[in-house]
Amino acid sequence: KQYAVRREGNMISIYGRGAGKGGLFTTMVLLVGVAGQYMGGHSSGRRRKTRLYLLFNAISLPFMVLIGLMSGMMAVVVAAAFYLFHLANQPVENNLIAHYTPSRLRSSSYGLKFLFTFGLGAFGASFAGYIFDHFGSGSVFFALSGVLALLLVVRAEEGPKPSLVVAPTSVVTVWRDEAARVTPERAVALWHGPPSQRHAIDPNRFDVVVTSYGVLRRDAERLSEYAFRYAILDEAQSA
C-alpha cells in the first residue's frame, strides 16, 4: 500500500512514498514557473505588453487542456510547460499596472490587483475542487481551460476600444501628457476646447480619450454613441 490517509481533527493528511514523490514533482514544476517569471519580466521590457499578455495566455491554454489528457511523467512535463507561460504573465501584469496607472494611484492599483487575484483565486480553487469531486481530476483542466478560452474569445470579439479618462479641467492636459509619456505606443486624444474642435475627433481612432467633467456633461449624448472599454474618473468625489 503506497498511501495512508489519516484524519487529524478537521484536516486530512496523506502519507506515503507516492505523496513525497508528488511533492517533488510539484517543486520541479514550480521551479520551471520561476524561469517563466524571468522570461516574462525580460520580454515585457521589449515588446508591447498587452499583446504579450494575450500571447502568454493563448500559449498556456493548449497545455492546460493536455494536462487533463496525460498521465505519469508526460503530465509533469506538460504541467511544467503550462507553468512556464502561465507564471510568465505575472511580471507582465505588474508592468502593465506600472505603465497604465498614474504614480499616485499605483500602490492602490497593485493592492486591487492582488485582492482580485487571490480573491478570485480562492473562488477558482473551490470551483476546481467541486469539478474534481464530481467529475474527476482530468475534468478540472478541461473546465479551467474552457473558462480561459472564453475570456480570450470575448476579448477578441470586443476588438480594439478606446478608454475614457474624465478629470478636473485643471489636470486634463496633465493626463494627456502623462499618458503619452508613459505609453508612447498609445494614441491619446484630448476631448476639450471649442465644440467644433471636440466633435471633429473620432474616439475610435484613439486608445485613450481625456476630457473634463464639464465637457462630459455637455457632450454626454454624443460620447454615449461610442463604446469605451474602461472609464477612469479622477477626483470623482469632488465633481
Image (tube, rainbow, N blue to C red):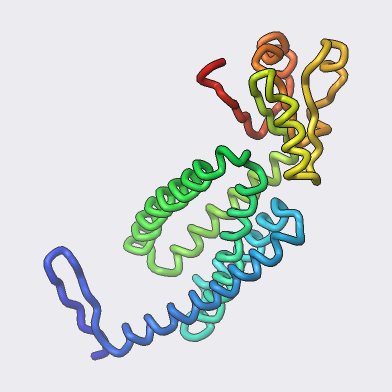
Residue 44 horizontal/vertical position (percent): 69, 60
* Residue at the outermost left position: 9
Give the position of the N terminus as an image quadrant.
Answer: bottom left
* Residue shown at the point (83%, 25%) measured from the top left: 202
Q: Is residue 165 left or right of residue 239?
A: right
Residue 113 horizontal/vertical position (percent): 50, 47
Give the position of the C terminus as an image quadrant.
Answer: top right
Total residue callouts: 0
Q: Is residue 7 left or right of residue 82?
A: left
* Residue shown at the point (44%, 79%) measured from the top left: 27
139, above or below 222, in the image? below
In this view, the residue in front, 236 or 199, is 236
Q: Is residue 130 left or right of residue 142?
A: left
* Residue shown at the point (48%, 43%) measured from the top left: 112
Q: Residue 7 sits in which quadrant?
A: bottom left
In this view, the residue in front, 61 or 118, is 118
